[in-house]
C-alpha cells in the first residue's frame, strides 16, 4: 500500500538529516499521493509537518501522473544571501532554473514546466496544512484557493481504477 516506514519520516529522522545538510540545502521526499481525506494524503500532511519542524519551509511538487507528490524542505541559509524571510523559490525561479538545467543536461523534456507547478506549504505552526502556488498572492477568500494543490482528484482515481485507503 506504499507505506513508508515511520522511522524514515519521523521528526527525529529529519532532524538527523538536517544536521548534515549544508545551509540552503534541500531534503527531498517522494510519497504516494491520494485524494482528500485518504490515508495517503494524511501521511503527506504529517510528513510535511515533520519536515518543516526539523528542516525548514516545505514546497510540494505534483508529479506528471498524480500517483506521487514530491516534498522539498529547504534549510535556511546563514550567509545572508537571498530572501531570509521566505527562502523558498518562486515558480518563476524554479521554471528558469529547470529550463537551464534541462538544456545543460540535454533532457528531451523541460524540467521548468514541471517545476513551475510548485506549491508552498503553510502549516500555521503545525496546526494545519494548506498549499498555495509558490510565490503567488491569491485572495484567501476565493474558493479557487481551496481547490489548488497536489491532492489527487477523485475523478482521476475513478477513471484509472486506483485503490485508495481511507
Image: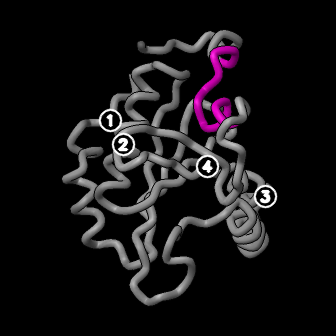
Percent across and percent down for residue 162 are 57, 14
* Foreground label between 2 and 1: 2
Instruction: Tell me whether the residue at label 2 lies in contact with that at label 1, contact meaning CB atoms closer than 8 angstroms.
Output: yes
> Image point 37% across, 54% down: which residue?
52
CA–CA distance in space, label 1 to label 3:
30 Å
Question: What crowding class fits label 3: few (fewer than 14 Cα within 10 Å), some (14-19), or many (20 or more)?
Answer: some
**Can you say whether 131 is above or below 94 in the image?**
above
> Image point 40% across, 28% down: which residue?
42
Can residue 31 be found in the magenta stretch?
Answer: no
**Can you say whether 161 is above or below 36 in the image?**
above
Percent across and percent down for residue 116 are 72, 55
CA–CA distance in space, label 4 to label 1:
22 Å
Question: What crowding class fits label 2: few (fewer than 14 Cα within 10 Å), some (14-19), or many (20 or more)?
Answer: many
- Label located before the other in sequence (4 or 1): 1
Can residue 147 be found in the magenta stretch?
Answer: yes
CA–CA distance in space, label 2 to label 1:
10 Å
Pointer 1: what residue? Answer: 4
Pointer 2: what residue? Answer: 47
In this rendered view, identify the residue nearer to me: 139 or 29. Answer: 139
* Foreground label between 2 and 3: 2
Pointer 4: what residue? Answer: 119
Question: What crowding class fits label 1: few (fewer than 14 Cα within 10 Å), some (14-19), or many (20 or more)?
Answer: few
Pointer 3: what residue? Answer: 110
Percent across and percent down for residue 100 are 75, 73
- Label located before the other in sequence (1 or 3): 1
> Which span is picked out in magenta?
145-156
Amino acid at each position: 500500500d506504499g507505506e513508508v516506514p515511520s522511522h524514515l519520516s519521523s521528526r527525529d529522522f529529519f532532524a538527523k538529516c538536517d544536521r548534515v545538510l549544508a545551509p540552503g540545502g534541500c531534503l527531498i521526499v517522494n510519497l504516494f499521493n491520494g485524494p482528500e481525506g485518504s490515508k495517503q494524503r494524511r501521511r503527506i500532511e504529517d510528513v510535511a509537518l515533520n519536515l518543516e519542524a526539523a528542516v525548514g519551509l516545505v514546497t510540494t511538487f505534483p508529479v506528471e501522473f498524480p500517483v506521487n507528490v514530491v516534498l522539498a524542505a529547504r534549510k535556511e541559509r546563514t550567509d545572508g544571501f537571498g530572501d531570509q524571510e521566505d527562502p523558498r523559490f518562486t515558480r518563476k525561479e524554479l521554471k528558469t532554473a529547470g529550463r537551464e538545467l534541462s538544456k545543460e543536461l540535454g533532457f528531451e523534456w523541460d524540467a521548468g514546466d514541471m517545476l513551475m507547478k510548485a506549491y508552498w506549504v503553510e502549516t500555521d505552526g503545525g496546526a494545519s496544512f494548506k498549499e498555495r502556488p509558490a510565490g503567488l498572492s491569491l485572495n484567501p477568500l476565493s474558493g479557487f484557493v481551496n481547490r489548488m494543490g497536489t491532492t489527487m482528484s477523485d475523478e482521476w482515481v475513478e477513471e484509472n481504477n486506483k485503490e485508495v485507503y481511507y
